[in-house]
Every structure is written in C-alpha cells, then in structure tokens.
C-alpha cells in the first residue's frame, strides 16, 4: 500500500482521487488552502491521515507546505492537482507580484517538486488546453501581454507537462508523468462540462499507485489511462530547461 500526498484535495478531482485511494487501502495526506477548508477536506474524506495547509498563490506558504509535508515523513507519490481555471478576467497579482494563475498552476508545483523529499512517483494534472499553450515562454508573468485568462491557463497547463518531463529526465529514479482528466463537471469544469466525471480522477490514482507496466513509466502523457500525444514542444529539452530556470529565478528555489 502506498502513501500519497495530493495538492488541492479539498474539492473536485483531488478530493475524488483521495477518496478512491483510501477505498483501495492507501494512505492519503490532503492539502487545503486554509484551516477551514482543511477541516472540510478531512470531513469529506474519512480515513485521510491528515491535512496540510497553505495557499499555493504565495511562495512563502508554498514553501511552508513543503516543510509540513517533509515533517510527515516520506511519500510514495505526490499528485500535483491544485489549480485555478481559465476565467480570471484580469491579471490578479499575488503577494509576490506574479499572476495568480501562473503562481498556483506553474510555480507552486515547481516549488513543491523541488522542496518535498523525492517520492517514488510524481503526477502532474495538465489539460487538453495545454495544446494551445505558448511554448515560447515569453512574458511568463504577463507584464507586457494584454491579459487573456484562457491563454494564461493553457500556458500554465503546458508548463505542467514541461515540468513533468523535465523532472523525468533529471531524476531517472522517479516516475514523473502528466495527464489530462477530460473536461468534467467540477467547480473548475462547470456544470455543463461534457466528459465523464467518474473517469476524471482515475488516471492520477493509477499513475500514483498502480504496478501495471503501463503505469510504471516516466516522462509520458496520459488520458484515461492511455498514452496520448502531448504538444510536441513539451519534448524539447531546451524549453523544459528554460522553464525550470525561469521558475528557479522567480521563486528563489533551485530544482536539485
Ligand atoms: N475540471 C476539468 O474539466 C479539468 C479539465 C482539465 C484539467 N483539469 C485539471 O484538474 C485539476 C483539478 O481540477 P478540478 O476540476 O478538480 O478543480 P476544482 O474543483 O476547482 O478543485 C481545485 C482544487 O485546488 C484547490 N486550490 C485552488 N487554488 C488553490 C490555492 N491557491 N491554494 C491551495 N489550494 C488551491 C481548490 O481549493 P478550494 O476548494 O479551496 O478552492 C480545490 O481543492 C487541475 O489541475 C485542473 O487544471 C480539470
């Protein structure tokens, strides 16, 4: 049985993944943005070991999340699931002066990857929208581009795949993969989302704990437990390294 940490497990696919892992007999540590959401998360996922608290929009709080996780001991898998969606109407600046979407969806998984003691497996939630992400990585922090919420989200989901593949290359002993869950009716997906919610959380669970040969790979991209072709730019090691370098510069945290 495995021990798994899931970011953003107070709702949606993260919460569903936590519930499924516990049903399967695994140990799960949850994560929520604040104390109240943390209590709600624990109530919604009976059997969870504990909850780690921190707002991933803040670099300081994200660093603190990593410290809390490390104090809990080793994990077999970390699922980088937390994210915000594509409907932010303007560039919302975080306390660090970064766009909210970039801070939560790109920089937080980078910081947590760098600072949490290496698990055996890393799973990154991307989206089909990553296909239209901007692979030039120009103006990552939206200082010179006019704000476009959907583009910012698509860019961040491209970054998540680049991060998964960069880590797969740098850390050969760790299985590091990315996936898209389909467009499903969570808080982010919205009520009208057309895909099957019951499939939305299964691939991240499978990549985190299954010993099937198809799940014990690294540097791959999945949809519904099947390999899917990611944006070809995600295979470009120069773009991967450029993203890692930018995240290192913006966060002050180096990827070991
Ligand atoms: N739903 C879809 O159709 C869809 C499609 C493609 C990809 N995805 C990806 O799937 C993943 C899960 O999405 P979802 O649909 O389950 O979204 P969701 O229902 O909105 O849940 C997102 C989770 O992340 C947490 N979170 C957001 N911002 C946070 C912050 N600043 N600090 C800490 N926690 C934060 C939320 O906490 P609160 O509950 O407190 O807000 C919640 O637990 C995301 O990575 C998303 O990009 C979803």
Image: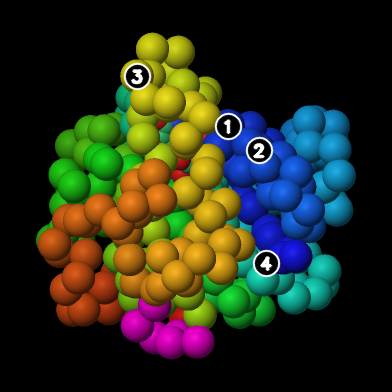
| Residue 142, image x, y percentages | 26, 47
Q: Position of residue 17 (x, y in %)?
A: 62, 43
C-alpha distance separating marks 4 and 1: 22 Å
Residue annotated with mark 4: 66
Which residue is pictured at 82% across the width and 47% down the height?
48
Quick one: label 4, few (<14), some, or many (20+) residues within 10 Å?
Answer: some
Precedes in sequence: disc 3 or disc 1: 1
Question: Which residue was labeled with disc 2?
Answer: 15
Check the image and report above or below for 231 versus 211: above
User: Residue at horizontal 50%, vertical 66%?
Assistant: 212
Q: Residue at x 36, y 29 (%)?
A: 183
**Image mark for residue 12:** 1
Which one is closest to the eye, mark 4 or mark 1?
1
Label 1 CB, ligand 1: below 8 Å? yes
Circle 3 residue: 194
Asked if residue 130 shows in the view, the reply is yes
């Amino acid at each position: 049985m495995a021990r798994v940490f899931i970011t953003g497990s107070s709702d949606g696919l993260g919460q569903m993944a936590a519930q499924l892992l516990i049903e399967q007999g695994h140990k799960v540590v949850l994560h929520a943005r604040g104390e109240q959401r943390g209590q709600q998360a624990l109530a919604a996922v009976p059997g969870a070991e504990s909850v780690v608290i921190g707002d991933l929009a803040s670099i300081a709080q994200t660093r603190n999340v990593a410290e809390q996780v490390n104090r809990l001991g080793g994990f077999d898998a970390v699922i980088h699931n937390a994210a915000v969606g594509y409907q932010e109407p303007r560039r919302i600046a975080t306390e660090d002066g970064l766009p909210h979407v970039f801070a939560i969806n790109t920089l937080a998984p980078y910081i947590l990857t760098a600072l949490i003691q290496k698990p055996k497996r890393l799973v990154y939630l991307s989206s089909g929208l990553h296909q239209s992400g901007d692979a030039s990585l120009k103006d990552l922090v939206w200082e010179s581009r006019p704000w476009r919420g959907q583009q910012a989200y698509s860019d961040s989901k491209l970054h998540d795949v680049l991060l998964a593949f960069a880590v797969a290359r740098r850390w050969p002993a760790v299985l590091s993969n990315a996936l898209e869950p389909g467009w499903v009716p969570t808080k982010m997906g919205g009520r009208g989302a057309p895909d099957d919610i019951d499939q939305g959380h299964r691939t991240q669970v499978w990549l985190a704990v299954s010993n099937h040969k198809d799940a014990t790979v690294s540097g791959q991209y999945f949809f519904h437990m099947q390999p899917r072709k990611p944006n070809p730019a995600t295979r470009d090691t120069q773009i991967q390294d450029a993203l890692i370098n930018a995240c290192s510069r913006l966060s002050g945290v180096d990827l070991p």
